[in-house]
Image (cartoon, rainbow, N blue to C red):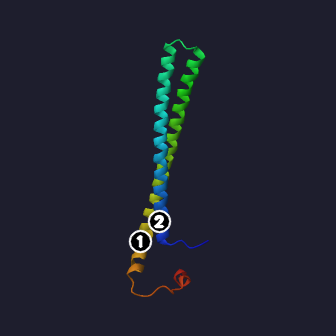
């Protein structure tokens, strides 16, 4: 397993949060569109019922509307899970920042060339 640097962890957590938030928003938009279509389908069901279209067709159209609303609700619930994942990724970023940022700042400010530093030496107690 390769060592993960603080900056890599920051970037990975930030990228994950952005990607998941973007995906959740896309799902939410699709769910809204499906819900609007479900409402239209429900109106069609009522309209064709008033026109004397056979009961089976009216019933099937009404049922389709209910199914579409269920799909919309499930998609919104799925997007909410994405929101939770985004929050978790941000929490990882915040924790890494809290835990490691002081070390990173000190490392960045040092005038000592640490490129040849033996990292195993730092791990010793």
Eyeballing the image, is 109 above or below 7? below
Direction top: furthest residue = 52
Taking depth in this image into account, of 92 and 67 the one nearest to the observer is 67
Residue 101 numbered mark, or none: 1
Q: 10 Å neighbourhood of mark 1: few (<14), some, or many (≥20)? A: some
Q: Residue at x 49, y 44 (%)?
A: 27
Quarter containing the N terminus:
bottom right
Q: Residue at x 54, y 85 (%)?
A: 118
Q: 10 Å neighbourhood of mark 2: few (<14), some, or many (≥20)? A: few
Cα gap from disc 1 to disc 2, whole angstroms: 13 Å
Label 2: element kind:
helix
Taking depth in this image into account, of 22 and 121 the one nearest to the observer is 22
Direction right: furthest residue = 1
**The quarter of the displayed image where residue 95 is located:** bottom left
Q: Nearer the viewer, mark 1 or mark 2?
A: 2
| Number of callouts | 2
Label 1: element kind:
helix
> Mark 1 touching mark 2, by CB under 8 A?
no
Q: Earlier in the sequence, mark 1 or mark 2?
A: 2
Residue 52 rendering spot, x and y as whole percentages: 53, 11
**The quarter of the displayed image where residue 123 is located:** bottom right
Residue 69 rendering spot, x and y as whole percentages: 51, 31
Residue 72 rendering spot, x and y as whole percentages: 51, 36
Eyeballing the image, is 97 above or below 33? below
Q: Residue at x 60, y 17 (%)?
A: 56
Eyeballing the image, is 111 above or below 49? below
Residue 74 rendering spot, x and y as whole percentages: 53, 38
Residue 112 numbered mark, or none: none
The residue pinned by badge 2 equals: 11
């Amino acid at each position: 397993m390769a060592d993960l640097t603080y900056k890599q962890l920051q970037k990975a957590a930030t990228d994950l949060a952005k990607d998941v938030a973007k995906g959740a928003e896309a799902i939410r938009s699709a769910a809204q569109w499906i819900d609007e279509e479900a409402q239209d389908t429900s109106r069609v069901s009522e309209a064709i019922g008033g026109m004397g279209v056979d009961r089976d067709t009216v019933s099937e159209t009404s049922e389709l509307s209910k199914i579409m609303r269920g799909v919309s609700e499930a998609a919104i619930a799925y997007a909410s899970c994405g929101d939770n994942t985004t929050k978790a990724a941000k929490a990882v970023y915040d924790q890494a920042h809290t835990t490691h940022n002081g070390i990173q700042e000190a490392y960045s400010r040092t005038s000592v060339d640490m490129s040849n530093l033996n990292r195993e030496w730092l791990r010793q107690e």
